[in-house]
């Protein structure tokens, strides 16, 4: 039995609002810290610590990558935040997959009216041409992915009737 191993790393586009929030929180932290130290204002120092923590979390969520790993009929998706923290967001088996097709494919027309939970693990924006794929999983879940061509080929070899590349 041949086992395939494919790894794909996708960098999600961060929103401009999140970057502006990050810069604003850093500036606010510096100003409040300076005021707190200069005039011995304890409340300003406490607020500066709070805005510093908020700036850290904004930084972590501004730089997000998704890593797709295909191994032995399973797709594992990890979320990499700021190139330092890794969190596993899901493991999906191909036996339970219903369909994998480009997001604007006519093969997904039967699935459009379903009430499903949507999880977006793609680049986050629609590019031209749109290379994102939709994966319907067990009837109640829709994953939006940006896999490489190699990963789509390997998945198609394992489940040829469930994968479309039109």
Image (cartoon, rainbow, N blue to C red):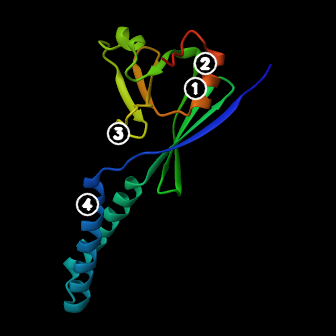
Identify which residue is drawn at 57% across, 26% down: 152
Specify whether 9 is left or right of 40.
right
For label 2, the SS is: helix
For label 1, the SS is: helix
Determine the CA span between mark 2 and mark 3: 25 Å
Q: Determine which residue is flagged by label 2.
A: 156
Estimate the x, y position of residue 159 in percent, counting from the top left: 61, 14
Q: Determine which residue is flagged by label 4.
A: 21
- Badge 2: few (under 14), some or many (20 or more) residues near its Cα, within 10 Å? some
* Up-down relation of residue 68 to residue 36 (above or below): above
For label 4, the SS is: helix
Residue most extreme to the right: 1
Q: Determine which residue is flagged by label 1.
A: 152
- Among the two numbered marks 1 and 4 on one chain, the one whose residue lies closer to the N terminus: 4
Checking the image for residue 3, the label placed there is: none
Q: Quadrant of residue 102?
A: top left
- Among the two numbered marks 1 and 3 on one chain, the one whose residue lies closer to the N terminus: 3
- Among the two numbered marks 2 and 4 on one chain, the one whose residue lies closer to the N terminus: 4
Q: Determine which residue is flagged by label 3.
A: 125
Disc 2 versus disc 4: nearer the observer:
2
- Among the two numbered marks 2 and 3 on one chain, the one whose residue lies closer to the N terminus: 3
Determine the CA span between mark 2 and mark 1: 6 Å
């Amino acid at each position: 039995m041949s086992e395939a191993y494919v790894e794909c790393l996708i960098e999600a586009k961060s929103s401009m609002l999140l970057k502006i929030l990050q810069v604003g929180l850093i500036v606010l932290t510096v100003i409040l810290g300076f005021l707190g130290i200069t005039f011995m204002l304890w409340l300003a120092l406490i607020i500066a610590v709070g805005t510093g923590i908020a700036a850290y979390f904004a930084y972590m969520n501004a730089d997000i990558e998704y890593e797709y790993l295909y191994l032995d009929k399973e797709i594992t998706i990890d979320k990499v935040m700021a190139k330092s923290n890794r969190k596993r967001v899901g493991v999906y088996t191909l036996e339970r997959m219903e369909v994998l097709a480009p997001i604007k494919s006519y093969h997904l027309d039967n699935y459009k009216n379903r009430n499903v939970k949507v999880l977006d693990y793609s680049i986050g924006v629609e590019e031209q041409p749109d290379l994102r794929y939709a994966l319907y999983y067990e009837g109640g879940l829709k994953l939006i992915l940006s896999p490489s061509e190699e990963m789509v080929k390997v998945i198609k070899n394992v489940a040829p009737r469930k994968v479309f590349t039109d």
